[in-house]
Image (cartoon, grey):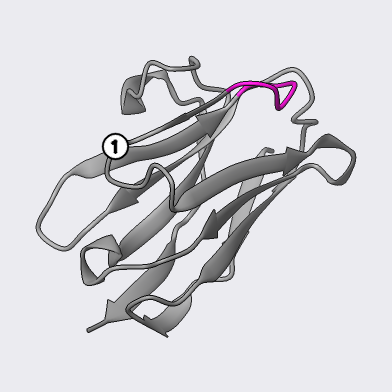
Amino acid sequence: QVQLIESGGGLVQAGGSLGLSCAVSGRTISGIHMGWFRQAPGKKRDFVADISWSGLSTDYADSVKGRFTISRDNAKNTVYLQMNSLKPEDTAVYYCAADLILDSRLQSTVGYWGQGTQVTVSS
């Protein structure tokens, strides 16, 4: 059974930083593309970032470009999202996504989801 466990969420002031981790068990992430989505209260789940299986290619939503960085460590079967210069509008539940179609930005292409971790940015 494939499981994605996110960690690192919490409460931070605007302008601060948080780092999220997504540890995968049940299969290796080598060879599959990974990503992050988020869902703010009352809104649909949106694409945040994705990363190719090799780590050489990344894609970001315009709203986070230049502030967030996605990375991966295939040896640790883990994907990361470093979030800097956080804004109140970044407040959302952040979901790790595995085995997706790179650059599609579509939820429908995601094979596996994590349970989500809450990120709250206060103004």
The quadrant in which the C terminus is found is bottom left
Q: Nearer the viewer, residue 66 or 57?
A: 66
Q: Is residue 97 magenta?
A: no
Residue 84 percent coordinates (x, y):
47, 63
Q: Residue furthest right?
A: 75
Tell me: residue 29, above or below residue 83. Answer: above
The quadrant in which the N terminus is found is top right
Tell me: residue 104, above or below residue 14. Answer: above
Tell me: residue 47, above or below residue 85. Answer: above
Q: Report the number of discs.
A: 1
Q: Quadrant of residue 52?
A: top right
Q: Nearer the viewer, residue 61 or 35?
A: 61
Left or right, 115 with respect to 1, comes to: left
Q: Amino acid at mark 1?
A: Asp
Residue 64 percent coordinates (x, y):
35, 47
Left or right, 95 with respect to 27, comes to: left
Q: Which residue is mark 1?
A: 62
Q: Is residue 55 magenta?
A: yes
The residue segment tinted magenta is: 52-57
Give the residue drawn at x 50%, y 16%: 102
Which SS does the magenta portion mostly show? loop
For label 1, the SS is loop
Left or right, 14 with respect to 114, comes to: left
Residue 98 percent coordinates (x, y):
57, 32
Q: Nearer the viewer, residue 96 or 102?
A: 102
Give the residue drawn at x 58%, y 59%: 6
Give the residue drawn at x 66%, y 42%: 71
Disc 1 crowd, CA 10 A, few/some/many (<14, 14-19, 20+)? few
Q: Residue furthest front?
A: 66
Residue 87 percent coordinates (x, y):
28, 68
